[in-house]
Image (cartoon, grey):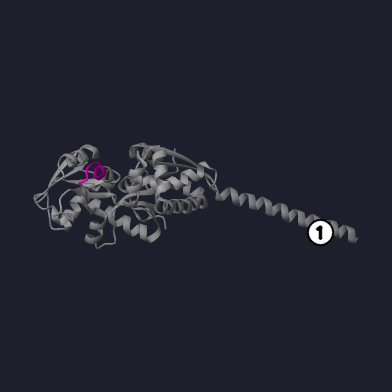
Amino acid sequence: MKKIKGRLLTLAVMVMMLTALVLSGCGKKEESAEIRVGALKGPTTIGLLHLMDEAEKGNTQNSYTFTMATAADELTAQVVKGDLDIALLPANVAAIVYQKTDGGVTVLDVNTLGVLYLVSGRDDITGVADLAGRTVYLTGKGTTPDYCLQYLLAQNGLSLEDVTLEYKSEATEVAAVLSENPDAVGLLPQPFVTVACAQNDALKVCASLTEEWDKAADDGSSLLTGVTIVRNDFLKEHKKAVEQFLKDHKESADFANSNVEETAALCVAQDIIAKEPVAQKAIPFCNITCMTGSEMKEALSGYLKILYELNPTAVGGELPADDFYYE
């Protein structure tokens, strides 16, 4: 009888252990996933580079596949079709995708704050308020840099009657104007700012539009460049894996800010910035971050509201609802 009881006890223990192993295995499967991530070749991806490198080495819990693109519409099309699970996009483009998918995406984080700077050789320009009577060279009429500058002009009591905006098709064209005439004023993003200043010692950064925005805005908004979105269908099926991605992304962004030399090498390897010395100088001014939760919602919703007031189509015609923000 004792032998039978002993065998039953042993059998019960074995069953419990097998059950625990099965449940443990299921848990691990749920916590990790194959995640397809899309990103642009620009500042918004710099904070992702360490994660990309770690994933390639097999050091991540999730299994990641990365797609790099040169234009945002390449990524948005893949998100809409379901070919990407997570994408790093310009902040206003994320709002447009939200509208196109009937609320089918959620913003996980802000990955990059403002990367726009006023560049000139002049000593009498230290902020947007000093642009009265000047001509500013910039790219993209009707794009976010244009809207952001117009907003800041208005916040400083200036209008388009006070400042002339001269539009160019490429940032390199703006840089060329500044190179030929250092007394001109240009609005450039990083890393073009660093390149322009390196090519002409007479040029310097006169003002950061991110800092100008912080001084002008009283609504908690921030000047933003990029955000990270996830398809809601994927989020529902793999919430723990998405949470793990957020941890990975934050660690990667922190690495970019604290390990500039290594990140510069990764920038060159991924063809984001051509030369390491340029990358090393530009990275500290790219405002790389991983802003989440209520802070992200306040900064992003305020930014989108300002763009909406300037031109509703810039954010997809309507402001996103609260479910746009992951909290």
Q: In terms of image quadrants, where is residue 42?
A: top left
Q: Give the residue pinned by disc 1.
A: 9
Left or right placement of residue 209 versus residue 242 in this view: left
Q: Please count the marks in the image.
A: 1
> Seen from this angle, which residue lies furthest right?
1
Viewer-proximal residue among 297 and 111: 111
> Callout 1: 10 Å neighbours few (<14), some, many (20+)?
few
Quadrant of image for the C terminus: bottom left
Residue 253, position as x, y percentages in the image: 42, 52
Residue 240, position as x, y percentages in the image: 52, 52
Residue 91, position as x, y percentages in the image: 32, 48
Tell me, yes or no, whether the highlighted magenta stretch contains residue 300: no
Quadrant of image for the N terminus: bottom right
Tell me, yes or no, whether the highlighted magenta stretch contains residue 197: yes
- Identity of the residue drawn at 32% across and 45% down: 93
Mark 1, secondary structure of its residue: helix
- Identity of the residue drawn at 34% across and 40% down: 72
Give the vertical position of 154 relative to 267 (above or below). below
- Prevailing secondary structure of the magenta residues: helix
Viewer-proximal residue among 156 and 178: 178
> Seen from this angle, which residue lies furthest bottom?
218
Left or right placement of residue 87 versus residue 306 in this view: right
Q: Which residues are magenta?
A: 196-201
Residue 87, position as x, y percentages in the image: 40, 44
> Seen from this angle, which residue lies furthest front?
201
The answer to whether residue 51 is seen in the rendering is yes
Amino acid under label 1?
Leu
The answer to whether residue 78 is seen in the rendering is no
